[in-house]
Image (spheres, grey):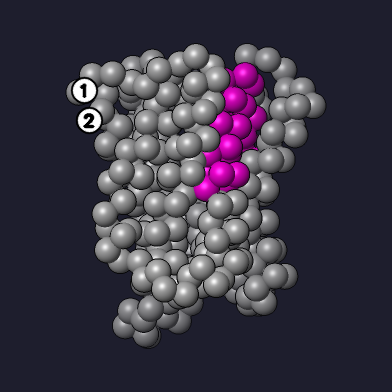
Amino acid sequence: MQTPQLRHWILLAYLVLAWGWAFYLIAIALDAFQPVTIVWGRLTLGAVVMIAVLWWQGGTMPRGWLWWRRLLFLSVTGNILPFILIAWAERSVPSGEVGLLMALMPITILILGHYFLEHERLTALRVIGVLLGFAGVALLFGEDLFFSGGGARLTGQVAAVVATFCYAINGIYTKRLPAFDTVAVSAASLLTGSVLLALPMWNLQTWPGVEELAAPWIALFVLGIFSTGAATWVYFTIVSEVGPGFLSTINYLIPALAFFVGVTLLDEPAGVAQLAALALILAGVWLIQPRRSVTAS
């Protein structure tokens, strides 16, 4: 692995911006599109970008029925389900709050990894981190968790948390796969999701009048090209060159940026509960980090 250079820090900043702004873009796209349509657009445009990268690098798509079965699982757990759950959650939950809830992802990966990966173990310090993270979630859920009986907002919050477990399952499954070309598998996974969602998208989306709304269209294209396709390529470029440990800071920066953008551009709430939840969740993420060198994965 290389020592991080200036271009790696620039790529890291790109990831933070692309994924931190994604929650805002989803909120804008929801003004005209169904959640499944947004996800189909993300996957289709992302697949176009990644296939172009694959062609540029001279690579080929995975071959064989076994790999396409794996791709089906990767696409469902890493793209289709979490993307739909996030977009659906944002219909009733502020985009910044969904971004905060997604900060649970490293915690959910740790919880599942304790049982399915040899090197991920729940130490006492990590257990405290897990508890802090879920205390932050409980704070965001607020009185809805105890008194509302399951309103739309609570359901959306639960959907966002479930999305983090989908990502965790996907991440653990990926680590257990044999060596593979990350660009080829990513391109094929995005393409698989696009094909699977094409018919549901067409049946659920109401098209009349959508062409009159420029902002949702722009948001969808930016989301697909920059926050999905290009961001996927940047992510794997960083991992392959300097290792996944270099990416640990995005676990703090992305939810904070998502929250800030939602508050400033969408007038979403920024009360004591939201700020305290942000602090608790990020403190939990910090506590679960491996206590090794900064380049450890």
Instruction: Name which residue type carries label 1.
Output: Leu
- What range of the chain is rendered magenta? 224-252
Q: Is residue 245 magenta?
A: yes
The local secondary structure at tag 2 comes to helix
Instruction: Identify residue for label 1.
Output: 66
Instruction: Identify residue for label 2.
Output: 69
Q: Quadrant of residue 60?
A: top left
Q: Is residue 172 left or right of residue 233?
A: left
Q: Position of residue 160 (x, y in %)?
A: 43, 60
Assess whether mark 1 and mark 2 are in contact (beta carbons under 8 angstroms): yes
Q: Is residue 90 left or right of residue 243?
A: left
Q: Quadrant of residue 251?
A: top right
Q: Residue at x 28, y 46 (%)?
A: 196
Q: Disc 2 to disc 1, how far (Cα)? A: 5 Å
Q: Residue at x 31, y 43 (%)?
A: 195
Q: Residue at x 58, y 59 (%)?
A: 219
Camera-nearest residue between 122 and 152: 152
Quarter of the picture holding the C terminus: top right
Local packing at callout 1 (Cα closer than 10 Å; few below 14, some 14-19, many 20+) is: few
Camera-nearest residue between 129 and 264: 264
Residue 229 visible in this rendered orientation of the protein: yes
Quarter of the picture holding the N terminus: top right
The local secondary structure at tag 1 comes to helix
Residue projecting furthest to the right: 6
> Is residue 233 positioned above or below 258 on the image?
above
Residue 91 is labelled as: none
Q: Position of residue 256 (x, y in %)?
A: 66, 57
Q: Position of residue 122 (x, y in %)?
A: 42, 39
